Amino acid sequence: MSASNCQRRTVLFLASMVSMVLGSIHAFSVFLEPLETLFDASRATVSLTYSFSLVFVTITVLFGPAVYSRVRPATIYTWIAVLGLIGPGLAGFADRLEIVWLGYSLVFGLANGLGYGFGLQFAARAYPGRSGFAMGVVTAAYALGAVLAPYGFEVALAVDGMFSAMMALGAAVFVVSIGAAILVARSGAQYSVGRKPDADAAPSASLPWGHITVLWIAYGSGVAAGLMAIGHASGIATAVGFAGWIAAAAIAGCNLVGSLLSGWLSDRMSHRLILTTLPLVGAAALLVMPVAPGLTLVLLGVVGFAYGGTIATYPATISRLFPGEAGPRVYGRVFTAWGFAGLVAPWLAGRIYDWGGSYTLALWVAAALGLASAITAIRILPRT
């Protein structure tokens, strides 16, 4: 194996490992009831913890491309380690929900966005001819973190509540990210590996904002459906008699499969077909869920699969539509739709639950958003 191939594999492995521990953010639904009890707060208010964290993930992904090529990868992973330790630490010691928002939502959210956004682009640059595959692996690793975390969080919560859960999270992020910093420094891999710098990259003002806006709508409505279900997976399942942590793990596990499969397929078939089919499949599952409660875990898995495929395919689509240095910048802008959806969708689901004690209307809203995503994608994306 050549040194270049060694570096490529090292980059993909490290980006995936860091992404995995950060993906635990999407197991947040297991904290809904503990936080409600601890701070005597409503479901909608507690849901804002997850919503706010996704906003800060988005902000970091948006502005990250301005940093990636100016700082060594080892330095970025060190930043992630420090922020990933401090944020959950603050949340673990919190005596008010606002401190949880400061530590988990803000600080951990920034670490999360930096690790996920950088890892996605770092891996794509390492495999310029197979960027869909590379991005799919990193996205799948992000989902794997959400598969593994729920049971671990449940065990930690049983030991000493939110304190032990947050301490375990901070320690995991710190150890893995510091390890990544050391290994990437030893490998000599750089952010520009596998691709020449694009000195003639177009300035932001010249980007086609009309096209970006429509992509924003298609992406945002598609992920909103998934985030609404992911943010409340535990609550949705508990309401019909299933264990909450199993639901969180199930939706995340299918998210992982969807990310891997769609990442692989995006190098081989029409992105338009993928991004039209997945939201429709997810919408169908959401519509069936209220009338078939016995299938809730299976249907949550279908929603997770559709969400994972969507978030894995869109970055590959954007890199194809906007080659060179424009790709990461356009993706950062389109990714703000994910942040907006993350802010609104989980909170809205919590508010609907508080109003009527049921998630049925929230599931219908999520299904409508999935349908809107499919319609928009089929109208704007090229057939190939």
Image (cartoon, rainbow, N blue to C red):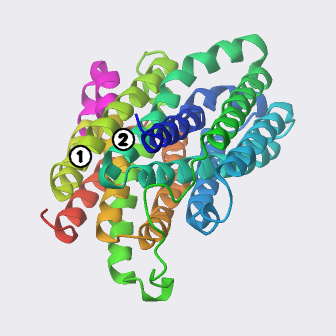
| Residue 240, quarter of the rendered image | top left
| Residue 78, quarter of the rendered image | top right
Residue 170 picture location, percent across and down = 74, 31
In the displayed structure image, the side of residue 361 where residue 81 appears, left or right: right
Position of residue 260 relative to residue 107, above or below, is above
Ranked by sequence position, the earlier of labels 2 and 1 is 1
The residues colored magenta run 287-303
Membership of 67 in magenta stretch:
no
Looking at the rendered image, the quarter that the C terminus falls into is bottom left
Residue 59 picture location, percent across and down = 61, 62
Give SS at disc 1. Answer: helix
Tell me which amino acid carries mark 2: Gly
Q: Nearer the viewer, residue 344 or 213?
A: 213
- Using the image, tell me which numbered label, if any, was put on residue 317: none
Asked whether residue 361 is in view, the answer is no
Residue 255 picture location, percent across and down = 37, 34
